[in-house]
Image (tube, helix red, strand yellow):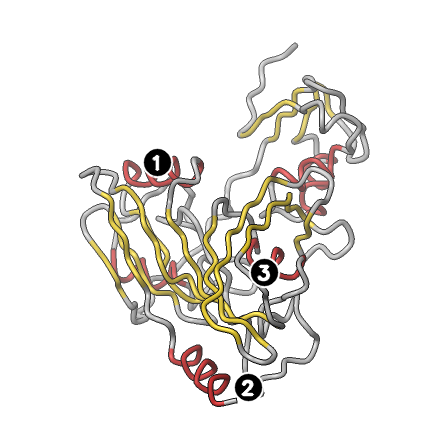
């Protein structure tokens, strides 16, 4: 069997036996659309056991899949003087309080005004390069309309250390959210999460080849039609809290993708979800640091209105 010279490889598990190649790749690489992965397969950039394959090819246990991802298209990602709400900064890390409406890194349709544009201006050349020119320093992300704390790495040493903690699920991540309906008690949601088989912009629970996802939630305050909660992530899947709360019948207030089609709060844009607490082991000192991002003003105003009835 020829040597795999691709940029990524893995073996199909027993659970994945019988799956289509394009479906399996979609589950493994959530940031890539299925159509783009199908194009890679048709172009010969994906092999199974050293041979080119077709998107619909069925896989067997221990099949060796090799993928060659083309390098990111070189873009002129311009530093932009966008104010940053910096919660913590040293020579290795910068933790920012991301505002609502800001995209984390450049992508189709969003090549300016992103957090990366702002970081390039603030940090100059002091950002890790592991995730390429489009995502310098970015080791994890939060959704465009989710606010709150996000850690960025200034060098590859810090990036590798923080990425390892993310992989081990040892980073503390606590979110605040307002959900529809009254939750009765605290709880834990454990499912798998993967790309929705029909609606490709959405994630869904308990889909084929989904990844294990665990969210713990704690009730902070109940209102007649809503509940204010804290969610702690044990894993960090795409849209995890949003999908999990929908799965138990309590979608997040204002969520345009997983909640009611018409938002009951006039003027609210996007989900009421805030990444409040971020705690991790500092890559250089070994000390545990924990940072809190204060609730944004819009979130506080909604809580006041709900408290007033």
Residue 300 picture quarter: bottom left
Q: Residue at x 46, y 49 (%)?
A: 74
Toward the viewer: 47 or 249? 249
Instruction: Determine which residue is flagged by label 2.
Output: 267
Above or below, 256 against 308 in this view is: above
**Residue at image location 28% in from the left, 40% down from the top:** 158
Which residue is denoted by mark 3 in the rendering?
Answer: 242
User: What is the CA distance from the residue labelled 2 to the residue labelled 3?
Assistant: 20 Å
**Rendered location of residue 308, percent (x, y):** 47, 89
Residue 48 in percent (x, y) is at: 70, 22
Task: Compare residues 212 and 90 and report the one nearer the observer.
Answer: 212
49 vs 72, nearest the viewer: 49
Tag 3 secondary structure: helix
- Are the two marked residues, 2 and 3, in contact with CB atoms closer than 8 angstroms? no
- Between marks 2 and 3 in the image, the one whose residue lies nearer the viewer: 3
* Residue for point 67% across, 42% down: 26
Q: CA distance from mark 1 to mark 2?
A: 41 Å
214 displayed left or right of 297: right
Disc nearer the start of the sequence (2/3): 3
| Classed neighbour count for the residue bearing mark 1: other residues with Cα under 10 Å, few (<14), some (14–19), many (≥20) | some
Q: Which type of secondary structure does the marked residue at label 1 adopt?
A: helix
- The mark that comes first in sequence, 1 or 3, is 1
């Amino acid at each position: 069997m020829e040597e795999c010279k691709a940029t990524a490889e893995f073996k199909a598990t027993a659970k994945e036996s019988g799956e289509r190649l394009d479906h399996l790749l979609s589950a493994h690489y959530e940031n890539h659309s299925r159509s783009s992965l199908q194009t890679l397969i048709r172009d010969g950039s994906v092999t199974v056991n050293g041979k080119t394959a077709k998107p619909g090819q069925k896989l067997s246990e221990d099949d060796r899949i090799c993928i060659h991802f083309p390098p990111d298209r070189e873009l002129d990602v311009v530093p932009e003087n966008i104010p940053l709400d910096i919660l913590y900064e040293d020579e290795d890390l910068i933790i920012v309080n991301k505002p609502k409406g800001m995209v984390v890194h450049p992508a189709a349709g969003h090549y300016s005004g992103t957090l990366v544009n702002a970081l390039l201006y603030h940090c100059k050349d002091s950002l890790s390069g592991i995730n390429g020119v489009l995502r310098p320093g970015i080791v994890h992300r939060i959704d465009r309309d989710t606010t709150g704390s996000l850690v960025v790495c200034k060098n590859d040493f810090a990036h590798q250390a923080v990425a390892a903690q993310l992989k081990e699920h040892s980073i503390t991540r606590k979110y605040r959210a307002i959900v529809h309906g009254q939750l009765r008690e605290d709880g834990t949601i454990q499912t798998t999460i993967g790309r929705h088989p029909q609606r490709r912009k959405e994630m869904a629970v308990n889909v084929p080849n989904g990844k294990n996802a665990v969210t713990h939630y704690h009730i902070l305050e109940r209102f007649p039609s809503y509940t204010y909660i804290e969610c702690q992530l044990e894993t960090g899947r795409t849209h995890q809290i949003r999908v999990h709360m929908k799965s138990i019948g309590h979608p997040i207030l204002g969520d345009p993708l997983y909640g009611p089609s018409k938002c009951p709060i006039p003027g609210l844009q996007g989900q009421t979800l805030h990444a409040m607490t971020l705690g991790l082991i500092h890559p250089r000192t070994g000390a545990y640091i924990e940072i809190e991002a204060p609730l944004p003003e819009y979130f506080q105003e909604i809580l006041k209105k709900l408290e007033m009835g």
